[in-house]
Image (cartoon, rainbow, N blue to C red):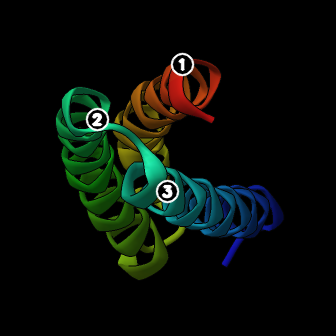
Amino acid sequence: MKEQHKALVDKMDAQIEKTRAEVTKLKANAKEAQADARIELQKQIDELDAKRAQAEERLDELKKAGDDAWEDLKSGAETAWKSLAESVTTASQRFG
């Protein structure tokens, strides 16, 4: 695995772990929230879980990709991560 390929995989692994921690925090907040807020927060959590799953799929594709193919997958993985990161930031600011 090329150094750039490995660096991207390692970076995305770390970011996904950070996202898991943020979602866990949001889930704890949802348990304490009032009914209306809890419903909205659960919608956000469900959206984050879906985006995290998509980012993890892209990461798995990157991990399995050969040195020649990973460049082609890099853009999709970065786009999935960016969408997830933005959603986590928004949810954390709103409900964190």
Which residue is located at x 31 percent, y 47 percent? 45
Q: Which residue is mark 2?
A: 44
Instruction: Classify mark 1: helix, strand or loop.
Output: helix
Is 2 rendered above or below residue 38?
A: below
Tell whether 58 sits left or right of 89.
left
Query: In the orientation shown, which residue stands out farthest toward the front?
Result: 34
Which residue is located at x 47 percent, y 77 percent? 63
Q: Which residue is mark 3?
A: 23
Q: Which residue is mark 1?
A: 94
Q: Nearer the viewer, residue 78 or 82?
A: 82
Q: Amino acid at mark 1?
A: Arg
Q: Nearer the viewer, residue 5 or 96?
A: 96
C-alpha separation, residue under disc 3 versus residue under disc 2: 9 Å
Whether the residues at callouts 2 and 1 have beta carbons within 8 Å, the answer is yes
Q: Which mark is residue 57?
A: none
* Dot 3 or dot 2, earlier in sequence: 3
Q: Nearer the viewer, residue 34 or 56?
A: 34
